[in-house]
Amino acid sequence: MNLFMAYQFIALGMLALGLYGLLLRRRLIGMLLGVELMLNGAGLSIVATAQLTEASAQLGQLGTLLIMGLAAAEATLVLAIVIVVYRRFGTIEEQKISTLKG
């Protein structure tokens, strides 16, 4: 197995762990960590592809910086939403806040 495939399998593992965390966590912070792990896996895959193939290395690094910026903005927005939800409902467990009042 060459180095390129090893990086791709690690990125796929990060994606799978992030999806597992996103689907099975009860708290919003755990879901956020799952999404962050998935984005980091995508960034690793892009950098590995750009560095280990004939693709432009600078373009791969720029794409990964874009993903990192997106992840930072997403984390900031979700943490602000979590604070608002906690102040309103007193909990951050998704089962307790998903009920609608009619």
Image (cartoon, helix red, strand yellow):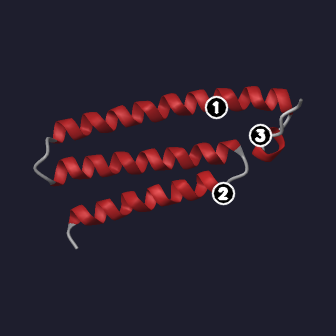
Query: Which residue corresponds to the image point at 47% horizontal and 49% vertical from the top-left?
Result: 38
Mark 1 neighbour density, 10 Å: few (under 14) some (14–19) many (20 or more): some
Asked if residue 73 is positioned above or below residue 48 in the image, the reply reads: above
**Mark 3 vs mark 2: in front:** 2
Q: Earlier in the sequence, mark 3 or mark 1?
A: 1
- Kindly identify the amino acid type of the residue bearing the numbered disc 1: Leu
In percent of width and height, residue 43 lies at 35, 45
Q: How many marks?
A: 3
Query: Which residue corresponds to the image point at 40% horizontal and 60% vertical from the top-left?
Result: 12
Q: What's the distance in space between the residues labelled 3 and 1, CA to CA?
A: 11 Å
Q: Which mark is residue 68?
A: none
In percent of width and height, residue 17 lies at 52, 59
Give SS at disc 1: helix
Q: Which mark is residue 79?
A: 1
Mark 3 neighbour density, 10 Å: few (under 14) some (14–19) many (20 or more): some
Residue extending farthest bottom? 1
Image quadrant occupied by the C terminus: top right
Mark 2 neighbour density, 10 Å: few (under 14) some (14–19) many (20 or more): few
In percent of width and height, residue 54 lies at 10, 49
The reply, left or right, for residue 16 in relation to residue 42 is right
Give SS at disc 2: helix
Q: Which residue is mark 2?
A: 24
Q: Earlier in the sequence, mark 3 or mark 2?
A: 2
Q: Which residue is mark 3?
A: 92
Using the rendered view, name the quadrant where residue 100 is placed: top right
- Kindly identify the amino acid type of the residue bearing the numbered disc 2: Leu
